[in-house]
Structures are given as C-alpha cells and as structure tokens.
C-alpha cells in the first residue's frame, strides 16, 4: 500500500507466478500482499519496490526453488527473500531463517504463523555465531554481501559434501574471480554460476553454486 493509502503502485501478479508456485500460489499471494501492505512502513523493502515486487523479488526468489533439498539455512533473511518465498514453494524442505535484527525476526515469525508454515524455524543470530551440530544440506543468501565476504559466513554452516546456493546479480562471475582466496580457504569445489529463469522471467537470477568439503 502506498503512503496515500492506495494500492495502485503494486505490480499486477504476472501470469507465470501461478505456474512457478503451483498449488502454493494462494500462500504466495498472501505473503506478497502482506509485504506490500507493511513492508515499507516496517523497513523491510524500499519505497520504490512495489511496482516490481512480484518480478524482482518474489519470482526472482522462487525461480531457484528446485535447487534445494533436505535442510536449508537462509542467511540474512530480512523480509523473507528468498527464505519465506522458497519455504512457501517447497514445503518438503526444512528451512531455518537466520536474521540478527529483532524487528525483522518479528516479521518473519508473524508470517510463519500467519501462513501456517510448519517447515520453517526462525533464528535470531548473526551467521558467524551459528554453529549447527550437523550442518545444513544447503545454505543460501540473497543480496547480503559480496561473495568474498559471504563465503566465510555461509560455508561453515554447510555439512561436509553439502552445497552453497547463493543468489547473486549480473556480476556473479566477477565475484567468483574476486573470491578465489576464500574459495580455496573454505574448500569449495565445483564453483559455478547457473542462470535461472531464462525465457521464463523478465529478469533472470544467477545462482553461485558450490560443494563444501
């Protein structure tokens, strides 16, 4: 909702949304509506995001849903992008949303309850302070920091043989080049960029994927 109380600026749901979410589309609509209604006021999204909320944020996150399995941690979940969106689309996967800011944790917990997401745990913590006993099968993050900074935060959370699947922008390849020291230090292998959503979304997503040994 805009500052004057109208909803005219909210992007119309693209047709492809129903295809990507399948029978979970109503849950996705409820989350998107809540984010549009409260996101700016609560400091979760910027004032210019409503006209592209579906395209740039919701669909940009859900397009990666097939890449996940088992137990997944989302670092710096913020508004729930991508963690809540992915948890909606993949109820068969167990998600842990790790977020240090109390007001964002409150929002995440509210949405987990409102959307009846039984496959989500919210953890208020900094990523560097989390040390799971067994490690996660996959760790993800979106729009958190450059890869060379992100690898030391995420790789220690992955079980041996597990994966990093980090959602990045157009410069993903350059970020890999700049993170060679961290890639070696944290024993990442099969590091590559996968382009998601070509021919499906107006804006593609790039996932930096790697195995952690």
Image: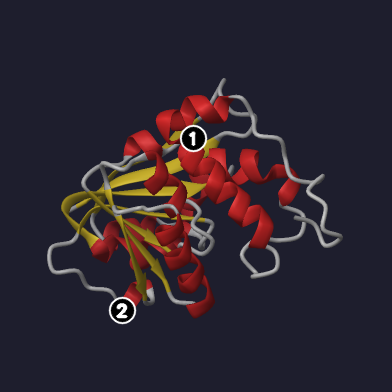
Position of 137 compared to 181: left or right?
left
Dot 2 falls on a residue whose secondary structure is helix
Residue lying furthest right: 4
The quarter of the rendered structure image containing the N terminus is bottom right
Q: Nearer the viewer, residue 122 or 129?
A: 122
Query: Label 1: few (<14), some or many (≥20) within 10 Å?
Result: some
**SS at mark 1 in the image:** helix
Image spot of residue 35 (x, y percent): 61, 56
Rendering colour mode: secondary structure
At which x and y percent is residue 206? Answer: 49, 39
- Where residue 25 is drawn, which disc sits there? 1
Q: Which residue is mark 2?
A: 129
From where the camera sits, is residue 140 visible?
yes
Out of 74 and 6, give the one closest to the viewer: 6
| Residue 141 located left or right of residue 211 | right
Location of residue 143 by image quarter:
bottom right
> In the rendered image of this protein, does residue 17 appear above or below residue 107?
above
- Label 1 – label 2 distance at C-alpha: 35 Å
Is any part of residue 39 visible from this angle?
A: no
Residue 69: image x %, image y %? 25, 42
Which residue is painted at 47% across and 39% down in the image? 62
Q: Earlier in the sequence, mark 1 or mark 2?
A: 1
Left or right of residue 146: residue 98: left
Which residue is located at x 30 percent, y 54 percent? 118
Q: Residue at x 46, y 62 (%)?
A: 77
């Amino acid at each position: 909702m805009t500052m004057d109380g109208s909803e005219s600026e909210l992007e119309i749901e693209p047709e492809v949304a129903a295809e990507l979410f399948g029978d979970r589309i109503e849950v996705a609509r409820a989350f998107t509506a809540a984010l549009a209604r409260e996101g700016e006021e609560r400091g979760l999204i910027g004032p210019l995001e409503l006209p592209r909320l579906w395209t740039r944020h919701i669909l940009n996150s859900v397009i990666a849903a097939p890449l996940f399995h088992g137990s997944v941690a989302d670092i710096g979940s913020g508004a729930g992008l991508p963690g809540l969106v992915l948890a909606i689309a993949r109820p068969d996967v167990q998600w842990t949303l790790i977020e240090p800011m109390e007001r964002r944790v409150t929002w995440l917990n509210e949405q987990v309850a409102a959307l009846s997401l039984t496959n989500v745990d919210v953890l208020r913590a900094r990523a560097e302070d989390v040390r799971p006993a067994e490690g996660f099968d996959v760790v993800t993050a979106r729009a958190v920091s450059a890869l060379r900074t992100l690898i030391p935060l995420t790789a220690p959370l992955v079980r041996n043989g597990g994966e990093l699947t980090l959602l990045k922008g157009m410069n993903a390849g350059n970020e890999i080049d700049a993170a060679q020291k961290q890639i070696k230090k944290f024993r990442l292998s099969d590091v590559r960029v996968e382009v998601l959503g070509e021919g499906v979304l107006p804006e593609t997503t790039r996932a930096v994927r790697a195995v952690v040994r």
